[in-house]
Image (cartoon, rainbow, N blue to C red):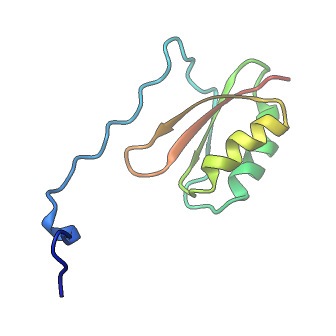
Amino acid sequence: MRFRGRSRKDDAPPQAAPPPPAAPPGAAPPVLVIDALGRKCPIPIIMLAERIREIPVGQIVAVLADDPAAHTDVPAWCRMKSQEFVWEETLPHGGWGFHIRRSY
């Protein structure tokens, strides 16, 4: 049964996915990439907290994660730990890359 004025999902034409955002101008590449794809939160945050000391102060670490909770958890962790959240990118095969600059 269909109601007038409503369409089914299959009736709509397919839409192209938006292109991933470009890196901010002058953004440095990450010195360390932490692959947390397939891991549920809080594991990406734990991995970040354990490994951020491996890079020099002022350098960038990238955390790759596909758990939707990482959208709020990574920036919140950066605020709590006084680290600089630089930018977020959408990965081509799903998930996101969160770029953090080590502040201390």
On screen, residue 35 versus residue 47, left or right, reads left
| Residue at image point 15% right, 75% down | 4
Q: How many marks?
A: 0
Looking at the image, residue 103 lies above or below residue 33: above
| Residue at image point 86% right, 23% down | 104
Looking at the image, residue 98 lies above or below residue 26: below
Q: Name which quarter of the figure residue 11 lies in.
A: bottom left
Q: Name which quarter of the figure residue 2 lies in.
A: bottom left
Looking at the image, residue 93 lies above or below residue 84: below
| Residue at image point 42% right, 26% down | 22
Q: Position of residue 25 (x, y in %)?
A: 49, 13
| Residue at image point 74% right, 43% down | 76
On screen, residue 9 versus residue 23, left or right, reads left
80, 67: nearer the viewer: 80
Q: Name which quarter of the figure residue 61 lies in.
A: top right
7, 9: nearer the viewer: 7
Q: Position of residue 73 (x, y in %)?
A: 70, 49
Q: Position of residue 37 (x, y in %)?
A: 55, 55
Looking at the image, residue 54 lies above or below residue 35: above
Instruction: Name the quadrant of the N terminus.
Output: bottom left
Seen as rendered, the residue at the extreme top is 26
On screen, residue 79 versus residue 39, left or right, reads right
Seen as rendered, the residue at the extreme bottom is 1
